[in-house]
Image (spheres, rainbow, N blue to C red):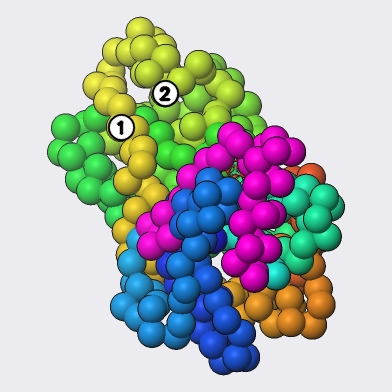
């Protein structure tokens, strides 16, 4: 099943789970619409051929949903009944930390074997250096910023570009470096408005004709990216300021090769771990090795930004 926000690579992970089951002679069902579909018994039998032609597709063929009912004991009891009725005796959930919390509680209540695969573009999950969809999102966003820079430099404009990342600045930091942004504003670091203005003035004085500032959704300097624009409008009349909020397009598109390979590796690990009797773990990537992290650690732990990248971005924006 896929649950929570969708991300590129979810289909590749579904394909991997289904084919790993077929390889090991295990009967496999897809659960439509996440926990909502689990409660409704919306299951579809899947074999190796039912996942053909999806490795390159964004989104999720099983659809995703957020289920209020699964947060209740009664909802989870209904879900358990449906699983037992269908003869299902383990599940793999592809989603974010909310989905893992749900799986963990379900496991505690019913001793039901569960395994998680991290699928979210924000990369905000502890226990893996990469979540599914993150690499694709970076490539999508860099491509768009390159295009915005074309127009920014033609008109001597300053662009504030808001990218996803409510709690962590992974996307902002990496696309900022990758697309050569002048400043990168992330939730982890409060640069302060004055330092931002100083930095923009310095850029202007050193001959830069346009500027790109990447702002993570969760940046703490202003209330939002439009407030930043207003502040710079008032205090730096030499710049013509524009805002671009990239929004949901960041979640779409065909997964990168990296995400397809990662999804394939994670699916195999999830199924083979369940076969060996493991349960209540999230599959993750650590030092290019596919590893397991207990759900409670994955959910409670914090995904930290790479401080070395922060320094690189500072040096690059001189
Ligand atoms: P994203 O990172 O995209 O937000 P997510 O998996 O964190 O993905 P959530 O909406 O937080 O998305 O969680 C997905 C679903 O998991 C919820 O709709 C709910 O059904 C279930 N869930 C989340 N938290 C709990 C909980 N504490 N108890 C039971 N179920 C939960």
Q: Is residue 198 above or below residue 141?
A: above
Q: In the shown orientation, is residue 163 left or right of residue 101? A: left
- Residue 13 in picture, x, y percent from top left: 51, 70
Q: How far separated are the C-alphas under marks 2 and 1?
A: 9 Å
Q: Is residue 32 visible?
A: yes
How many other residues sit within 10 Å of disc 2, few (<14), some (14-19) or many (≥20)? many
| Residue appearing at x 49%, y 63% in the figure | 43
The label number, if any, that marks residue 244 in the structure image: 1
- Residue 69 in picture, x, y percent from top left: 61, 36
- Residue 11 in picture, x, y percent from top left: 43, 67
Q: Which residues are magenta?
A: 59-88
How many other residues sit within 10 Å of disc 1, few (<14), some (14-19) or many (≥20)? some
Q: Which residue is mark 2?
A: 225
Q: Is residue 273 above or below residue 173?
A: below
Is label 2 in a helix, a strand or a loop? helix
User: Which image quarter: residue 210?
Assistant: top left
Nearer-N-terminus badge (2/1):
2
């Amino acid at each position: 099943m896929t649950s929570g926000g969708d991300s590129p690579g979810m289909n590749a992970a579904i394909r991997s789970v289904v084919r790993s089951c077929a390889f090991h002679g295990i009967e496999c069902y897809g659960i439509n619409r996440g926990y909502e579909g689990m409660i409704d018994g919306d299951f579809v039998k899947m074999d190796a051929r039912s996942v053909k032609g999806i490795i390159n597709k964004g989104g999720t063929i099983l659809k995703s949903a957020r289920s209020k009912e699964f947060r209740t004991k009664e909802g989870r009891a209904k879900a358990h009944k449906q699983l037992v009725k269908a003869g299902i005796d383990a599940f793999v959930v592809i989603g974010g930390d909310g989905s893992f919390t749900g799986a963990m509680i379900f496991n505690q209540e019913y001793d039901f074997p569960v395994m998680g695969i991290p699928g979210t573009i924000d990369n905000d999950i502890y226990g893996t250096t990469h979540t599914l969809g993150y690499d694709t999102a970076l490539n999508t966003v860099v491509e768009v910023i390159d295009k915005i820079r074309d127009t920014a430099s033609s008109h001597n404009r300053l662009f504030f570009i808001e990218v996803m990342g409510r709690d962590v600045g992974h996307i902002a930091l990496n696309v900022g470096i990758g697309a050569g942004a002048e400043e990168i504003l992330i939730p982890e670091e409060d640069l302060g408005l004055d330092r931002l203005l100083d930095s923009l003035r310095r850029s202007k004085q050193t001959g830069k004709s346009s500027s790109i500032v990447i702002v993570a959704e969760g940046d703490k300097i202003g209330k939002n990216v439009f407030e930043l624009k207003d502040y710079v409008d008032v205090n730096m009349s030499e710049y013509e300021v524009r805002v671009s909020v990239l929004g949901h397009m960041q979640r779409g598109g065909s997964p990168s090769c990296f995400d397809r390979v990662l999804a394939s590796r994670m699916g195999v690990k999830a199924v083979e771990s369940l076969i060996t009797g493991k349960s209540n773990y999230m599959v993750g990537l650590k030092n290019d090795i596919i590893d397991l992290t207990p759900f409670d650690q994955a959910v409670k732990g914090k995904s930290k930004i790479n401080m070395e990248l922060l320094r690189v971005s500072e040096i690059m924006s001189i």
